Amino acid sequence: MPNLRRFAMSLTRSRDSADDLVQITAEKAFAARDRFDPATRLDAWLFRIMRNAWIDMIRRAKTQGTQLDIDDMPEAAVVDGTHVVETNLMLKSAQQAMAELPTDQREVMMLVCVEEMSYKEAAAVINAPIGTVMSRLSRARITISEKMGIKPTPRRSSEHIRKNQR
């Protein structure tokens, strides 16, 4: 359940909606339990059910009015030393960078990096080829590192190394 809730939070960005989505997923999975293939991973099957339920929620939301998210409420920062403050700032930066990713990149990032699914399993959840998963994940990682100010160390060519040895 914690993994389902975490994935739901990444999709909905709202605690209430995430809880609703987890409940809907559990209900749908229970109703369809006779269609579960024991040869597959249960969590991948549940994530796919959740993703489809989320898509249904988005379609329904288009006809609803404006909703406010409880996460938009400011919270007091924990000030318990330099390390805690730096960690909180880095986490907020990472969360902000993840939140700004396009939905397709964010869901692949959550499935592969947080839920530790293989590319093949993530591809099955989102119903896309493995190459698409790899491409989206690569773009997501690059975008997040750029937004967080993390610059990759340039690789040295053999020519550059030879020049520096002279």
Image: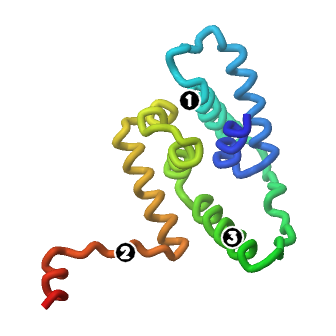
Residue at x 51% of width, y 32% of height: 125
Work out how far the residue at label 2 is from the one at label 3, CA to CA, in angstroms.
22 Å
Residue 61: x %, y % from top left: 72, 42
Q: Closer to the N terminus: mark 2 or mark 3?
A: 3
Residue farthest toward the front in the current orientation of the protein: 165
Circle 1 is placed at which residue position? 44
Work out how far the residue at label 1 is from the one at label 3, CA to CA, in angstroms.
31 Å
Circle 3 is placed at which residue position? 87
The quadrant in which the N terminus is found is top right
Dot 2: what SS? loop
> Label 1 near label 2: C-beta < 8 Å?
no
Residue 16: x %, y % from top left: 82, 44
In-front residue for pair 65/4: 4
> Which mark identifies residue 153?
2
Could you say which quadrant of the image residue 80 lies in?
bottom right
The quadrant in which the C terminus is found is bottom left
Q: Is residue 36 left or right of 85 when viewed as pictured?
A: left
Residue at x 80% of width, y 55% of height: 69
Dot 1: what SS? helix
Dot 3: what SS? helix
Work out how far the residue at label 2 is from the one at label 1, CA to CA, in angstroms.
35 Å
Residue at x 15% of width, y 75% of height: 158
The answer to whether residue 53 is above or below residue 137 is: above
Q: Closer to the N terminus: mark 1 or mark 3?
A: 1
Q: Is residue 101 left or right of 75 when viewed as pictured?
A: left
| Amino acid at circle 1 | Ala
Within 10 Å of disc 2 (Cα), the crowding (few <14, some 14-19, many 20+) is few
Q: Closer to the N terminus: mark 2 or mark 1?
A: 1
